[in-house]
Image (tube, rainbow, N blue to C red):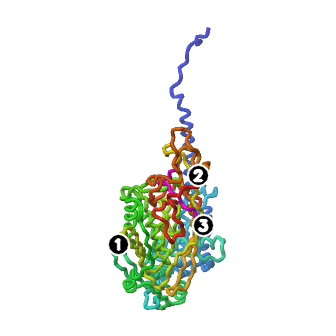
Amino acid sequence: MNVMEGQRVAKSKGGGKLPWIVAGTASTALLAAYIGVCVWASGRDSILPNVSVAGLDVSNMTVEQAQRAVETAVTQQGGDVDLTLTYEGMSETLNAGDLSVDSAQSVQNAWQVGRENFFIGGPQLLGHMLGASTQVPLALPEEEPAMEQLFSAMEQTVADRAGGNEYRLEGDQLVMTKGAAVATVDWEKVRQDAARSLQEGFEERFSGTSSRVNKTVVLSAGRGEEIPEPDFDQIYASLAVEPRDAQLDPETMEVSDHVVGVDFDVQTLKTAYQKAQEGETFSIPVTVLQPKVTREDLEGKLFRDLLGEATTTVTGTAARKSNVKLAAARCNGTILLPGEEFSYNNTAGAFSVQNGYLPAPVYVAGRSEDGVGGGVCQPSSTIYYAVLHTTLEIVERRNHQFAVSYMPAGMDATVTGSSIDFRFKNNTDYPVKIVTSSYDSGKSRKLSVKIYGTNVDGRYGVPTSTVYDVVEPTTTYEPDPTVPRGSLVLEREQNPYTGKKAHTYRTICEADGTVVEKQDMGVSKYKMRTRIYYYNPADGDPTTWVGGKPPAPVDPGTTTPPDPGVTDPGTETPNTPADPGVTDPSVTDSSGGTAEPDTQPPRSDSGLNPIDPNAVPA
């Protein structure tokens, strides 16, 4: 039996160090190779591959070879490179052939590529051998004379150009002195941009990219006191002015000064400026525009003329009369400057209890009902009628749904508190004023409107209207069991209205009556509202009555019914309804008009016939 069988053999000490020895050997070899490459790179007597000086390839050249190549290139091709500095049409140019190029320093910079540090020279050599490249600039002496001369010349050129433009108005002439801007140039940035552009120019020429190179550096300047060519539109904005009439301040009642206008042609100024030499003074004509209304003129003519007036009679309830007076008072003293518009709603409204208006009849769906502000249409209509006697411009006006009796047909102007307004414009050259007054004359309440202004040409307006398509009120019957049998009772509040149309014109005349024009003010369409009688249903429909009398009562105890043609005066004669003035804005007729009840017997000049309240239908 083998005595060694089953026995373990002990491992010799140090058997695990072999891998470390191998690794260490490899690292030593790599380090040695790296150092060898670095030694090789540093020991070369030529410039690295793919190295150029301002585009001139000096790869693998010795210092002497490279310096000769650079000097030759500068001598033969430097004159093909120009550097130009320019600013606002001014420029200075340098030819690179005049530069003092430091060829030795340029080549030395190329030689140093890969030799800056021993331990990185090897990798740089290998990199350039594999395609990496390095370009060094063409070295110039610090404060190179030709470059300094270029900068000095450009700086002087900019400084010589300095000087502001001046202009002023002298009578009917615009006098101007042509100057130049005071520029603030960052010359350090100019130097940097010029050096970079010059190197780019050498690169393009030495590399053969271009046979002739002109590099331009545009100077940027900070904002100076003036710019070389002025902003002519700004000059126009500062000097030109529209003539402005003297104005009346409606609050202080003071008259402002007028302004004399000035105008001139911008292109004429620009052309003259461009033709002028720097520092030259020249002038162009200006147009002097006189205002239509001077301060002296306005103060002498303010509100001197009565342009138009109208007077109406106010009837109805005490509440309605109060509303008419209040609305008119709110319009009293209103002043419109030339071009301004008068809005009745904005002046007299809002038509609310908070503003002092009272409930009075208004129209809702064609029926008369009490509503706040009833009657305010009478002042708007009276003002409109007064305006029709002037040459003032009507902007907005609507007729009522039913014809009113205090105004000729076609001369009324209804309003609501929101959607319908009455507006006119002061199209004259002077302020106008509205003056209203409510007063009692005998047993009647009157509303007067006068419009004052300045009538320079004496013209005035004459309003007329033609009434046609007149529809007299029809009669309708409505049953009411409270009506005594055998009688008819006339509706007290929903009084009838005659339907009609009225075509209104305003004839503008000269002071001597000569007609200037005839203005079409439109057609007003007024609805007809029926006359309503109430009857007892037991009497049957009155339209079936024989001889205009109801049939005898069936009850034998009933006495002979009264004659339907004679009713109780206390129940048949209708109350005089009130003009509400403010109508329900949701109610309009097919013509766009709104409604206002009659407030007095029809005027004798209205073209209407009075309605007999005691009339009984046949």
Measure the alpha-carbon separation of dots 1 and 2: 67 Å
**Mark number, residue 191:** none
For label 3, the residue is 52
Measure the alpha-carbon separation of dots 2 and 3: 130 Å
Q: Amino acid at mark 2?
A: Gly
- Label whose residue precedes the other's in the sequence (2 or 3): 3
Depth check, mark 2 against mark 3: the one in front is 2
Residue 372 showing in the rendered view = yes
Q: Amino acid at mark 1?
A: Glu
Q: Secondary structure at mark 1?
A: loop
Residue 72 showing in the rendered view = no
For label 1, the residue is 251
Q: Main secondary structure of the magenta part?
A: loop
The quarter of the displayed image where residue 473 is located: bottom right
Q: Residues within 10 Å of mark 3 (few under 14, many from 20)?
A: many
For label 2, the residue is 548
